[in-house]
Amino acid sequence: MSKGSPDGNVSADPDALADAARKAGARGLPPVDKWDPPYRGEMDLVIRRDGTWMHEGTPIQRTKLVRLFSTILKREGDDYFLVTPVEKLGIKVEDAPFVAVDVAEVDGGLHFTTNVGDTVCADADHPIRVTRDPDTGEPSPYVLIRRNLEALIDRKSFYRLVDMGETATHEGEEWFGVHSAGVFFPIIPAAELP
């Protein structure tokens, strides 16, 4: 499936990877968290902050291929890999591997849809978290999608969350945040609201 190169990168055959992903995921998401194949090196694949998948410097245009690759994505610590039952290839992720491109409130739950077609309701198992840039204060909101893989919540969806937000007591302090599936997710301390 893959061959090494002098620069340490692996030249992977995307079609072979896609075929392995198809076979492994014939009945839902492949169990990549249970696979521990040999590490074969780094693949020249980058997932940009905006959700674009770049292979050897070129965007992958085939949406179905990106979706398929997303099903064999695995995170170990801060590192990301494409994993099949027979090999593990390192890839780069600039921020989060997915982007939440839509959010809708349904029956008391906030349902997110990602750029690769996953849907998830924010709850205790799929929390929303917000980090803030220490220099600019700009928020970066995330929702956990699956197997410790997060989606960066896009700007329009984050604005919708803010519109749905309210002030509530969280861990003894007043916070502005959102409720979903009976869980409160803090966004910003109420004292810092404009």
Image (spheres, rainbow, N blue to C red):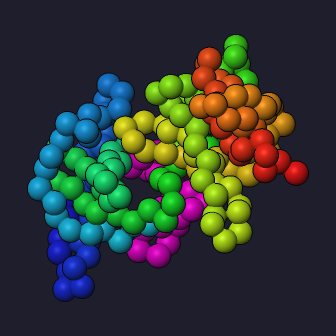
Name the foreground residue: 160 vs 36. 160
**Magenta-drawn stretch contains 12:** no
Residue 64 appears at what percent x and percent y?
48, 46
Image quadrant for the N terminus? bottom left
Q: Position of residue 100 (x, y in %)?
A: 62, 44
In the displayed structure image, the side of residue 45 where residue 188 appears, left or right: right
Residue at point 21%, 55% (across, down): 88
Percent across and percent down for residue 46 are 44, 66
Residue 164 vs 192, above or below: the answer is: above
Relative vertical location of residue 19 with respect to residue 14 in this rendering, above or below: above
Q: What residue range appears in magenta?
A: 47-70
Q: Is residue 13 visible?
A: no
Q: Residue furthest bottom?
A: 6
* Relative image position of residue 4 (x, y in whole percent): 17, 75
Q: Determine whether 44 is above or below 21 in the image.
A: below
Q: Left or right: where does residue 41 sit relative to residue 28?
A: left
- Residue at 73 percent across and 24 percent down: it is 105
